[in-house]
Amino acid sequence: MNNTDRRSFLGGIAMATVAASFGTGTADAGDRPGLAFSNRAHIFASPKVNEKLIWCFRDVLGCGAPISLNAPGMAEPILAFRFPGGGSFSVEFTEDALDEQRARRGAWLEIWSSDPAALKRKILEAGLPQVTYPATNTFYFAAPGGQVLGVVAGGNPSAGELRTK
C-alpha cells in the first residue's frame, strides 16, 4: 500500500467530478447554483473485515491495491480505493462501526459498470451475498462489513429503475 495525503488523493477526484458535471462548475442558466453528489464515498467498517474488504474492492471490483491515507490524530490509516472508471471509496476501520446487519440499513451506494451482467456474475461467483430490494430491478450486494452496493450500467444509470408492479 502506498502512503499519501488524503486530500490530494481524493480532492482532485471530487473537483474533476464537479467540473465534468457542470461544464465550468458555475451556476447553471437560472438563479440556482450547480449541485450534485460527488463520486467519492467514505464508510466505517470493523477491523475484523479489513482483509475481506480489501479483497472485495481490489480483486472482485478491480480497484487495485488500496492507498493508505494518514490522518492526523488517528491511530490507523484510512484505506482508499480508486475505481478504474473514476471515483473513490475510502474506509476507516474502527470498533465503533456498525455491525453487518445494521450497516445494511445505512446508505446504499451504486457503482457504474460498462458490463453490469459480467460484474454481477463475478460478484456472485466470489460468494458475496445478493441483497434484494423489491422496489427496484437493480442488482445489490453486501460487501464485507455489510455496506450495500448496487451495480448499474455506466451509460444508463437508470437501468435499475423502480418497479411499477
Image: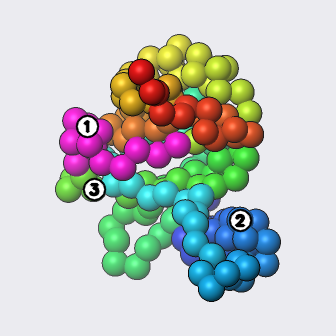
Sequence-first tag of 3 and 2:
2
Q: Nearer the viewer, mark 2 or mark 1?
A: 2
Residue stretch in magenta: 98-110
Judging depth in this view, the residue of 85 and 63 nearest the camera is 85
State which mark lies toward you, 3 or 2: 2
Three-letter code, disc 3: Thr
Mark earlier in primary sequence (2, 1): 2
**Residue pushed farthest right?**
23
- Taking the magenta stretch, the answer to whether it contains residue 99 is yes
Question: Measured along the vertical axis of the image, is residue 20 above or below residue 116?
Answer: below
The secondary structure type at the circle numbered 1 is helix
| Residue 15 is covered by the magenta coloring | no
First along the sequence among labels 3 and 1: 3
Residue located at (48% from left, 33% from top):
162
Q: Amino acid at mark 1?
A: Glu
Q: Secondary structure at mark 2?
A: helix
| Discs 3, 2 touching: Cβ within 8 Å | no
Q: At numbered mark 3, what does the secondary structure look like: helix, strand or loop? A: loop
The residue tagged 1 is 100
Q: Can residue 16 be seen in the rendering of this structure?
A: no
Residue drawn at x 46%, y 27% is 163
Residue at 63 percent of width and 55 percent of height: 87
**Residue 156: x %, y % from top left:** 69, 38
